């Protein structure tokens, strides 16, 4: 036999000699896994049964004894999973324990309330309580919005060229200085079946939604960018008010805007107040640290911003449907006034004793 053949024979012999050892090791691993499962499977099945009943909403079918044992059963399953991973037991057992412990974790440590119950609490007082807690910030934001409107009006009144700086081309179209009363009136009435008004409304909504988000997001910079955004955004409103006022269409423009504007501008007001609330907490943290003060203000402001998103959705619905259906100024003012009274009443008159 040649040396090469001898080497091959030795390797083959080594493989055959190792095969029984590998088979024995695999058999021992399977025995360990089976023994491990048999010792603890009863508790796993009990935990799985409790979790399944609770996930299905059948709490009444779970006995008091099983409810009290739930945390201990979860810890046992988690411990079993740790041991199974460390000792490299079979993959199917590890996957089963991972799924079971994840399901049990949400029941033991997860949120205790459903999304619907949270939503009811949110609308039932938590949102309005958070808004009331930012009363001084709302007044500051309101003053800035009024100031921005006045500044916008005064700038274009002094020099009409300012109009093109304050009002972007997406808003301007036919609404420019020098336009006749007939042209401006035509932008407010009789466009239910045309795309121009819809495109303008969509652009206005998109702008206000972006302003709301930015007012909140930039509040961490001590509220200064939020102030500038509020002034700049309402300067646009002041410029357009000046334009329509010059042609005797002030009330018609206010009615056209009010259908969705009382909701949308209120949302911007609250978003600006939320940003100012965070900025003021960081600038004047009081006895707390800056991070702690910012975290507390951020939680309250985030809750307000959740409601702002809902208000913007309501404004979009009003903008997309009510404005198309209502084509006279008194009716528009009625819808807009009703929404304004509704929001003021909800935030400041509707109280459920919730503290934030």
Image (cartoon, helix red, strand yellow):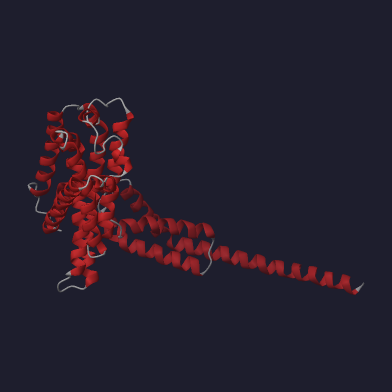
Question: How many numbered tags mark residues here?
Answer: 0
- Picture coordinates of residue 39, whole percent (x, y): 45, 63
Q: Nearer the viewer, residue 9 or 333?
A: 333
Q: Residue at x 44, y 59 (%)?
A: 98
Q: Nearer the viewer, residue 62 or 152?
A: 152
Q: Nearer the viewer, residue 52 or 130?
A: 130
Q: Determine whether 160 is above or below 300 in the image.
A: above
The quadrant of the picture occupied by the C terminus is: bottom left
Q: Residue at x 33, y 53 (%)?
A: 50
Q: Residue at x 14, y 29 (%)?
A: 331
Q: Residue at x 19, y 66 (%)?
A: 281
- Name the outermost residue toward the right: 1
- Picture coordinates of residue 241, whole percent (x, y): 18, 41
The quadrant of the picture occupied by the N terminus is: bottom right
- Picture coordinates of residue 259, whole percent (x, y): 18, 35
Image quarter for residue 319? top left
- Name the outermost residue toward the left: 349
- Left or right of 285? Residue 88 is right
Image quarter for residue 199? top left
- Left or right of 153? Residue 79 is right
């Amino acid at each position: 036999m040649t040396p090469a053949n001898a080497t091959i024979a030795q390797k083959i012999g080594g493989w055959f000699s190792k095969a029984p050892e590998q088979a024995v090791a695999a058999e021992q691993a399977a025995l360990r896994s089976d023994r491990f499962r048999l010792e603890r499977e009863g508790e796993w099945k009990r935990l799985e049964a409790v979790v399944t009943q609770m996930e299905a909403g059948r709490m009444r079918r779970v006995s008091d004894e099983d409810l009290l044992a739930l945390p201990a059963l979860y810890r046992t399953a988690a411990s079993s999973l740790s041991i199974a991973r460390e000792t490299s037991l079979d993959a199917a057992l590890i996957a089963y324990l991972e799924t079971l412990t994840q399901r049990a974790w949400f029941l033991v440590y997860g949120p205790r309330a459903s999304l619907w119950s949270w939503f009811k609490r949110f609308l039932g007082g938590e949102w309005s309580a958070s808004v009331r807690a930012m009363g001084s910030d709302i007044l500051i934001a309101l003053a800035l919005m009024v100031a921005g409107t006045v500044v916008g009006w005064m700038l274009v009144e002094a020099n009409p060229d300012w109009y093109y700086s304050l009002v972007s081309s997406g808003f301007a179209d036919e609404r420019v200085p020098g336009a006749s009363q007939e042209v401006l009136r035509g932008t407010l009435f009789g466009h239910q079946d045309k795309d121009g008004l819809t495109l303008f409304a969509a652009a206005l909504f998109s702008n206000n939604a972006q302003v709301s988000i930015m007012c909140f997001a930039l509040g961490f910079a001590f509220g200064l960018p939020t102030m500038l955004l509020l002034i700049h955004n309402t300067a646009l409103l002041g410029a357009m008010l000046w334009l329509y006022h010059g042609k005797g269409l002030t009330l018609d423009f206010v009615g056209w805007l009010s259908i969705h504007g009382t909701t949308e501008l209120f949302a911007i007001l609250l978003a600006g107040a939320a940003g100012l609330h965070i900025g003021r907490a960081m600038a004047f943290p009081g006895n707390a640290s800056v991070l702690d003060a910012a975290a507390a203000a951020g939680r309250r402001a985030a809750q307000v911003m959740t409601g702002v998103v809902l208000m913007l959705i309501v404004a979009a619905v009003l903008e997309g449907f009510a404005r198309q259906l209502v084509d006279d100024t008194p009716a528009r003012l009625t819808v807009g006034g009703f929404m304004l009274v509704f929001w003021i009443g909800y935030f400041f008159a509707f109280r459920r004793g919730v503290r934030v």
